[in-house]
């Protein structure tokens, strides 16, 4: 977490979801059922949860409190080209506070999705099994992972093909660091 987030006393459902490693809609259900205390922003549907209520909830339900300290965005880079993968990991590591991991195929990506529980997966669309891993992760209601398609120059310029397949976004090679960071930020900026 950034210094700013560590000092925040009130959190969004998206921030609570990252801390507890669940989907934002799961946090909304907890809130709506009264399982976790908070309030709605007047004139809005947005929910806010005081940090003290979150800690109480986590203790009651046996959720490890270490998530409060490690609420950083976790990104998994799945790229078959070693140079591209290593460059992405280095550049993202140098320019963000993300927790990063990388792998070269969708089999290892499936294992890493279970172990690492990434918030965002940058997935090379040329790899076999990509569509299946996206579908499998989407079938899990409690999973918070968004997928960003990393595709070649000949891909659908409007991204519609990938959005229909369940990807949250698409970046086309060659891409800039800013494009990658913006795509990740778009996935993680859920505020409800």
Image (cartoon, rainbow, N blue to C red):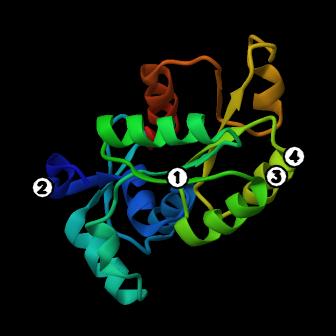
Q: Where is residue 160 shown, x and y percent of the image?
A: 79, 21
Alpha carbons under labels 3 and 1: distance apart: 16 Å
Task: Please name whichever residue, 102 or 169, is drawn nearer the observer in this view of the structure.
Answer: 102
Q: Nearer the viewer, mark 2 or mark 1?
A: 1
Please indicate whether residue 59 sits to the left or right of residue 154 in the image.
left
Q: Nearer the viewer, mark 4 or mark 3?
A: 4
Alpha carbons under labels 4 and 3: distance apart: 14 Å
Q: Secondary structure at mark 1?
A: loop
Q: Who comes first in sequence, dot 2 or dot 4?
A: 2
Q: Where is residue 71 shown, x and y percent of the image?
A: 34, 60
Number of marks in the rendered image: 4
Residue under label 4, please give it: 128
Which image quadrant: the C terminus? Answer: top left
Asked whether the viewer can see residue 140, the reply is: no
Alpha carbons under labels 1 and 4: distance apart: 22 Å
Q: Who comes first in sequence, dot 2 or dot 1?
A: 2
- Residue 161 in which image quadrant: top right
Residue under label 2, please give it: 7
- Residue 63 in which image quadrant: bottom left
Residue under label 1, please give it: 119
Q: Where is residue 182 shown, x and y percent of the image?
A: 45, 26
Q: Nearer the viewer, mark 2 or mark 3?
A: 3
65 shown above or below 155: below
């Amino acid at each position: 977490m950034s210094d700013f987030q560590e000092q925040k006393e009130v959190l969004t459902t998206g921030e609570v979801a990252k801390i507890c490693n669940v989907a934002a809609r799961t946090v909304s259900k907890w809130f709506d059922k009264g399982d976790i205390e908070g309030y709605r922003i007047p004139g809005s549907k947005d929910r806010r949860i005081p940090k003290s209520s979150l800690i109480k909830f986590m203790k009651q339900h046996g959720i490890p409190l270490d998530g409060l300290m490690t609420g950083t965005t976790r990104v998994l880079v799945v790229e078959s080209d070693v140079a591209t993968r290593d460059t992405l990991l280095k550049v993202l590591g140098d320019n963000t506070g993300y927790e990063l991991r990388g792998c070269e195929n969708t089999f290892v990506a499936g294992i890493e999705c279970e172990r690492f529980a990434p918030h965002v997966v940058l997935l090379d669309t040329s790899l076999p099994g990509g569509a299946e891993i996206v579908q499998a992760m989407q079938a899990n209601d409690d999973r918070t992972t968004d997928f960003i398609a990393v595709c070649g120059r000949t891909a659908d310029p409007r991204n519609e093909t990938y959005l229909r397949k369940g990807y949250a976004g698409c970046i086309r090679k060659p891409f800039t660091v800013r494009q990658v960071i913006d795509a990740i930020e778009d996935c993680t900026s859920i505020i409800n």
